[in-house]
């Protein structure tokens, strides 16, 4: 998803694409199946929430009664938080909740615009974990009841120098939460996110991506100038890895078949590691544009990358080689997801456009 809401669809695992229709004109940020996998839900700018019950062919706008109707929230993140529950968040200081698979939405947290509160992400962990929403200046809200009520956790220090924390992850193996962002700043949450401390790191590049492996306990952070940080103790200590790259890294994933770790980002760079992140080698990518999200196809476990200038590429060999898919657009793509019912891939960008396979 991205500016003005481009939606792409493939029915053959991303091999062929076809433009079916163009719809709304708002920038969309996320797309995800509902908890029961019976619908697709997308969120975006000016409070847009869209829902499709037919695999992305037709979309309906869902109403959200924002208290500050003159400044609707830019909903930049969304997660499934229970059997029927979905949570979306974004600036200014807003958390919205659906308890019926995305059909209706209620504002459960709202902060006046003048306070400058900006939520970056909502994090969900293993069963029994609370929900966590973190704000770019380091404030963390916690919910133990599926996002209905939220309480502010104590922050280790006030961060006042602009937007700092933009990414985060939970480690079920260690029971910790890691937030990261500007100049390599890292916050570590213990007790399932109830207590927090700053992690002392030398000042370094901005960090944009966070990832945790629940089986091994490995945590990775990545960001500007090819920066990669590696932790195996739940985030208490970090080791900076050498990538020999200068590009910004935006997304991290693991190939479940080969076990390879992959990073992707600016200028189409794709890095691959076969030794749990100690060393990185460049893979053969198919795009030269910025890559924004990497995901796995549920049926085949193939990897898919989406990015700017309509880039969609797919790898069936663990990220070693990539094939570009013709998306029929040069519009920027921000995010993607798979429709559980059909297995179709949907991505979103600068208009809402549905691309579907030609028979």
Image (cartoon, rainbow, N blue to C red):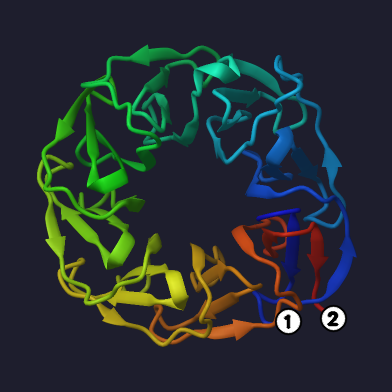
Look at the image and tell me in which quarter the N terminus lies: bottom right
Q: How many marks?
A: 2
**Inter-mark Cα distance, 2 to 1:** 7 Å
**Residue in the picture at 30% in, 70% down:** 259
- Disc 2 crowd rating (10 Å Cα; few below 14, some 14-19, many 20+) is few
Vertical side of 140 occupied by 10: above or below = below
Residue for badge 2 = 358
Q: Position of residue 267 (x, y in %)?
A: 45, 76
- Disc 1 crowd rating (10 Å Cα; few below 14, some 14-19, many 20+) is some
Quarter assignment of residue 94: top right
Q: Position of residue 249 (x, y in %)?
A: 37, 64
Residue 31 seen: no
Q: Are marks 2 and 1 in contact (CB under 8 Å)?
A: yes
**Residue in the picture at 54% in, 30% down:** 82
Mark seen at residue 57: none
Quarter assignment of residue 338: bottom right
Q: Nearer the viewer, residue 156 or 36?
A: 156
Residue 206 seen: yes
Vertical side of 227 occupied by 312: above or below = below
Residue for badge 1 = 16
Which of disc 1 and disc 2 is earlier in sequence?
A: 1
Q: Viewed as shown, does residue 190 lie left or right of 122?
A: left
């Amino acid at each position: 998803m991205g500016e003005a809401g481009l939606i792409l669809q493939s029915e053959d695992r991303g091999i062929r694409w076809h433009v079916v229709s163009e719809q709304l004109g708002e920038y969309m940020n996320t797309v995800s199946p509902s908890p029961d996998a019976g619908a697709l839900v997308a969120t975006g700018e000016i409070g847009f929430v869209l829902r499709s019950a037919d695999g992305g062919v037709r979309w309906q706008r869902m109403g959200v009664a924002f208290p500050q109707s003159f400044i609707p929230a830019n909903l930049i993140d969304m997660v499934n938080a229970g059997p029927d529950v979905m949570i979306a968040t974004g600036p200014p200081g807003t958390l919205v909740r659906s308890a019926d698979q995305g059909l209706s939405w209620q504002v459960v947290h709202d902060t006046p615009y003048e306070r400058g509160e900006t939520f970056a992400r909502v994090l969900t962990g293993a069963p029994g974990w609370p929900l966590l929403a973190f704000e770019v200046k380091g404030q963390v809200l916690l919910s133990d009841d599926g996002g209905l009520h939220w309480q502010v956790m104590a922050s280790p220090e006030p961060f006042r120098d602009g937007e700092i924390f933009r990414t985060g992850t939970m480690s079920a193996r260690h029971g910790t939460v890691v937030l990261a962002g500007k100049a390599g700043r890292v916050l570590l949450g213990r007790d399932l996110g109830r207590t927090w401390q700053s992690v002392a790191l030398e000042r370094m590049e901005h960090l944009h991506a966070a990832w945790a492996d629940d089986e091994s306990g490995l945590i990775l952070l990545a960001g500007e100038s090819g920066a990669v940080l590696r932790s195996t103790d739940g985030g208490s200590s970090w080791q900076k890895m050498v990538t020999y790259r200068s590009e910004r890294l935006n997304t991290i994933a693991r190939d479940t078949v080969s076990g390879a770790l992959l990073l992707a980002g600016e200028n189409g760079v794709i890095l691959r590691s076969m030794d749990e992140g100690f060393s990185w080698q460049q893979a053969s990518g198919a795009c030269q544009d910025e890559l924004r999200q990497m995901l796995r196809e549920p049926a085949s476990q193939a990897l898919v990358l989406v990015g700017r200038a309509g880039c969609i590429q797919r790898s069936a060999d663990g990220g070693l080689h990539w094939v570009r898919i013709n998306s029929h657009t040069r519009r920027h793509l921000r995010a993607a997801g798979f429709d559980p019912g059909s297995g179709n891939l949907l991505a979103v960008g600068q208009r809402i456009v549905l691309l579907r396979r030609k028979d």
